[in-house]
Image: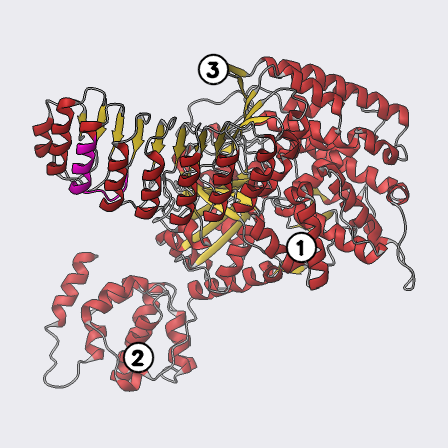
């Protein structure tokens, strides 16, 4: 075909042109066969020719009567040529203007250099191409479908524009280390940021239940529909992964039907639209929401790894093919799942961690939710006074529930007080249930609703039992979508309007019947727990069933896609899509419902004897399982501490203990840990989890070390740790979204007790304001010897404050300032602190924008220091002049052991000065110059001095 195109273009020179304009009739004749082979859509040509009165209806009928597309094109060309130059030129103009339809002709149009005459360029061209029309239809339908958010009260659909609030999103690598922030939704598909595997096909977004994954996708879809999500996608296909569970084992579907049937169907020529997608897969964008919610017995290993886009096969095979790039390679895919669902590295292009609301996000969401300024101020003040409630509100779903309950009670009871005590998640879901059960109550216009929670639950007891039975039935099978018959046999029409269930599109081969689902997975977990508590037939073994589901050896992380080309091992009978979080939530709510505080309510739904018996069974299980779990933890003996490393599952155990509100259980766990250094790193702990951590840790009688690095506790979590501060000697909260507000809390509390020795604050959001609080803490707490505050937002002012505080301190051992912006003035302040300091041993001022001026001051100061052993100055702007100053320092200072000048601007000249200085210094162990302006050839001159490291 390429050769034919070249030949035809060459033959264009043979078309006699004379001195006049080119002959468009001749162009159509010369390139006839190329046009016949590449024009796939004749309808758009005919529509425009008729509209501009170049063709009559009779002409169109003549062309349409030919059986093949090629013959139709030939007839259109014949008719156009017979009607003269203007019609022939207009035909070519349509081919140029409707680029979507005639994409195969782009090279030809460029080769012939077609430029329409003024007359033709003023003629209208309407794009009636099936591809373009389908693109617009997708936009229209997606715009309508995503305009509103279905709330828990189905009659109160809310505008997405007035509801969506931004969330903290971070790009991370395969080791879950932060690479950077997601500053806009387009970043998710921009290869310039966050890319970890260029061969991967799928952007994987994960986060806890209720954190906002579905809302994020809906916002993305809505922006695309409005033309405001510019990522080069012509088509946007969205799927909820639950639907793939609805396909029977023997049910097959082809890719074309999967795309069109479950999104929208092209009005014209679906074959042409599908052909375009196959030919240009990069124009298609897919979102797959809730990968962990797939529950299927289909054996993926029983089918070939590759499948044709045209063959009918099980829907799950198509899903795997799309995500892996075996189908529509190059298309854009975004997949969401709950934390703990590990997708194989082979298919992951980017990994995005959704963290929830920051304090500023929460304020913005509060502003959107409460339109009345007075009410909004009241809520914000109460949240500020109740860190426990604020912590729950960092999870968008729980925040919405809390705000909705507040709004309801304010209007129904004239009450505007949020609870001022510890609030558990069970409390919140009981409040939400009460709100929606009251929606059907008839009220007097002149009298507010004053029915108590007990009366509300008692009056709707049968409805609660029916909902809990449905939820439990699904939870046992990890099913989240229910057939219409399963719902209508248990619930009446009025119950369906309470807002706990919603209708969803029917998937698979189920005719025209509606399907239903709980409005969120956590709601189904709540009702499952309610079933376990209220059903008298549930015995001890069944009561604890879901704890057993969460305690299997492989619960920490599950790898999906257990097929040969991605994973060589699959346990027999294992569900490749399974995630345990819905079981964890069920256990959590079970603990909350069986707590002493809930017995007053539940005794109206079930006999007190049954509650007492089940509570006894649960607590006995807790005592034994916690003992067993604690014995299995990894332990280490440090200089002053006995360390225990816990796993993410331990956080769920703490959450469950907190829901019980049993001080006895908390004491038993604290005693059973047999350690005073608790390492909870990379456990996906949120701010609300700090309530659970404090609930157990405040039972420690002696000094405690708590390592919470690399979690998501933020300022609210710091406030939740208040009960522990009187015991905390070591606190590590690096990489946790902590701002100056959280640092103020740390200062206020830690300065009271003056026992803290180690403070890890690396990679948070601390500015000069927070740095000043840390400086005051250094001054006031002689016990504080280690401070790690690198990778924050500290500039010269904050750097000076810290330096002055260190200068006054007689006990500071290590200061880590890597990755701030203190500059030369900050470096000068640190230089003064270094002079004759009695204890400072390890100093990092790396990556701080320090130039020669600051470097020389530091070098001079080190001539008067006899304690520093390691000095990091990596990634600054130090040149040969600074290197010479450090060389002079090394002739005097015989205590420094390690000097790191990596990635500066030092040349071979500076390296020689440093090498010469080592001749009389036997104390220095290494001078690292990697990444400077020293070539490998130049570095050979320093080979004999092994302590100079250039490469």
Q: Is 415 in front, or is 752? A: 752
Indicate whether residue 815 is drawn in magenta. no
Q: Badge 3 is on which residue?
A: 639
Between discs 3 and 2, the one toward the N terminus: 2
Q: Is residue 136 left or right of residue 162?
A: left
The reply to whether dot 1 and dot 3 touch (C-beta < 8 Å) is no
Q: Badge 2 is on which residue?
A: 90
Q: Is residue 941 left or right of residue 341?
A: left
Identify which residue is drawn at 68% across, 25% down: 546
What type of secondary structure mainly makes up the magenta span? helix
Residue 542 picture location, percent across and down: 75, 22
Task: Choose mark 1 or mark 3, whichever is in front.
Answer: 3
Estimate how packed mark 2 is, as few (under 14), some (14 to 19) or many (20 or more) residues with alpha carbons within 10 Å: many
Residue 925 picture location, percent across and down: 23, 22
Q: Which residues are magenta?
A: 875-889
Q: Is residue 534 left or right of residue 555?
A: right
The image's mark for residue 150 is 1
Cα distance between the residues tagged 3 and 2: 86 Å
Residue 180 picture location, percent across and down: 41, 44
């Amino acid at each position: 075909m390429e050769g034919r195109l070249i030949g035809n273009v060459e033959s264009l020179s043979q078309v006699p042109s004379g001195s006049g304009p080119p002959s468009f009739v001749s162009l159509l004749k010369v390139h006839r066969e190329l046009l016949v082979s590449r024009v796939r859509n004749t309808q758009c040509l005919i529509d425009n020719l008729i509209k501009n009165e170049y063709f009559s209806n009779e002409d169109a009928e003549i062309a349409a009567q030919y059986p093949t597309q090629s013959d139709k094109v030939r007839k259109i060309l014949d008719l156009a040529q017979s009607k003269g130059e203007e019609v022939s030129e207009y035909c070519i103009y349509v081919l140029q203007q409707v680029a979507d339809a005639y994409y195969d002709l782009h090279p030809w149009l460029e080769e012939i250099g077609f430029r329409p005459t003024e007359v033709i360029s003023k003629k209208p061209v309407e794009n009636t191409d099936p591809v373009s029309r389908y693109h617009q239809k997708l936009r229209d339908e997606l715009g309508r479908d995503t305009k509103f958010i279905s709330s828990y009260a189905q009659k109160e659909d809310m505008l997405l524009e007035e509801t969506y609030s931004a969330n903290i999103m971070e790009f991370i690598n395969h080791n879950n280390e932060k690479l950077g922030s997601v500053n806009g939704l387009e970043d998710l598909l921009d290869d310039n940021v966050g890319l970890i595997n260029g061969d991967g096909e799928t952007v994987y977004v994960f986060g806890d239940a209720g954190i906002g994954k579905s809302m994020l996708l809906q916002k993305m879809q809505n922006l695309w529909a409005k033309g405001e999500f510019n990522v080069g996608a012509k088509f946007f296909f969205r799927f909820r992964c639950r639907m793939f569970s609805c396909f029977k084992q023997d049910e097959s579907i082809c890719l074309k039907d999967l795309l069109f049937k479950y999104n929208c169907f092209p009005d014209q020529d679906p074959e042409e639209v599908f052909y375009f997608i196959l030919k240009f897969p990069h124009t298609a964008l897919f979102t797959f929401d809730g990968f962990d919610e797939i529950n299927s017995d289909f054996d993926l290993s029983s089918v070939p790894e590759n499948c044709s886009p045209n063959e009918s096969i099980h829907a799950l095979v198509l899903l795997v093919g799309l995500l892996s790039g075996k189908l529509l390679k190059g298309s854009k895919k975004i997949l969401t799942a709950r934390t703990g669902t590990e997708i194989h590295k082979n298919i992951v292009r980017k990994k995005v961690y959704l963290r929830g609301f920051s304090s500023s996000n929460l304020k913005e969401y509060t502003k959107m939710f409460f339109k009345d300024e007075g009410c909004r101020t009241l809520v914000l003040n109460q949240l500020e006074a109740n860190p426990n409630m604020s912590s729950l509100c960092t999870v968008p779903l729980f925040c919405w529930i809390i705000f909705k309950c507040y709004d309801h009670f304010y209007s129904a009871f004239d009450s505007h007080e949020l609870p001022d005590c510890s609030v558990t998640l069970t409390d919140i879901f009981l409040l939400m249930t009460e709100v929606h059960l009251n929606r059907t109550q008839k009220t007097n216009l002149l009298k507010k609703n004053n029915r108590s929670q007990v009366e509300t639950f008692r009056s709707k007891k049968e409805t609660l039992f029916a909902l809990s039975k449905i939820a439990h039935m699904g939870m046992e099978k990890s099913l989240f979508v229910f057939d219409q018959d399963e719902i209508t046999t248990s619930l009446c029409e009025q119950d369906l309007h309470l807002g706990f269930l919603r209708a969803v599109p029917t998937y698979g081969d189920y005719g025209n019947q509606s399907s239903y689902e709980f409005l969120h997975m956590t709601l189904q977990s709540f009702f499952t727990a309610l079933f376990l508590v209220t059903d008298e037939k549930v015995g001890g073994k069944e009561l604890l069933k879901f704890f057993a589901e969460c305690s299997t050896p492989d619960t920490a992380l599950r790898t999906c896609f257990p097929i040969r080309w991605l994973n060589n091992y699959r346990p027999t009978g294992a569900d490749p899509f399974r995630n345990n979080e819905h079981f964890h939530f069920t256990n959590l709510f079970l603990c909350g419902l069986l707590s002493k505080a809930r017995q007053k309510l539940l005794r109206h739904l079930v006999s007190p004897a049954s509650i007492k018996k089940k509570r006894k069974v649960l607590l006995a299980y807790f005592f034994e399982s916690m003992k067993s779990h604690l014995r299995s933890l990894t332990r280490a003996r440090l200089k002053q501490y006995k360390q225990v490393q816990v796993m993410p599952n331990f956080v769920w155990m703490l959450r469950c203990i907190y829901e019980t509100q049993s001080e006895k259980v908390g004491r038993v766990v604290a005693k059973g840990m047999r350690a005073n250094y608790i390492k909870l790193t990379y456990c996906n702990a949120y701010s609300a989890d700090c309530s659970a951590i404090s609930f157990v840790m405040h039972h420690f009688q002696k000094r405690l070390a708590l390592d919470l690095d690399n979690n998501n506790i933020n300022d609210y979590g710091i406030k939740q740790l208040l009960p522990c501060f009187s015991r905390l000697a070591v606190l590590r909260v690096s990489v946790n979204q902590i701002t100056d507000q959280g640092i103020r809390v740390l200062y206020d509390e830690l300065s009271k007790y003056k026992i803290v020795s180690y403070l890890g604050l690396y990679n948070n959001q601390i500015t000069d304001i927070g740095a000043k609080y840390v400086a005051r803490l250094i001054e006031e707490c002689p016990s504080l010897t280690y401070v790690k505050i690198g990778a924050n937002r500290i500039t010269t002012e904050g750097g000076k404050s810290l330096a002055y505080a260190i200068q006054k301190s007689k006990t500071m051992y290590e200061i880590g300032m890597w990755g701030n912006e203190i500059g030369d003035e900050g470096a000068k302040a640190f230089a003064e602190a270094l002079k004759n300091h009695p204890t400072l041993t390890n100093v990092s001022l790396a990556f701080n924008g320090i130039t020669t001026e600051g470097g020389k001051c530091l070098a001079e100061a080190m001539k008067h220091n006899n304690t520093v052993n390691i000095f990091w100055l990596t990634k600054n702007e130090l040149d040969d002049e600074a290197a010479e100053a450090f060389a002079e320092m090394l002739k005097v200072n015989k205590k420094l052991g390690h000097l790191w000048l990596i990635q500066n601007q030092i040349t071979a000249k500076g390296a020689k000065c440093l090498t010469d200085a080592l001749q009389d210094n036997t104390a220095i162990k290494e001078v690292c110059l990697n990444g400077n302006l020293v070539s490998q050839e130049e570095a050979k001159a320093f080979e004999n001095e092994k302590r100079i490291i250039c490469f």
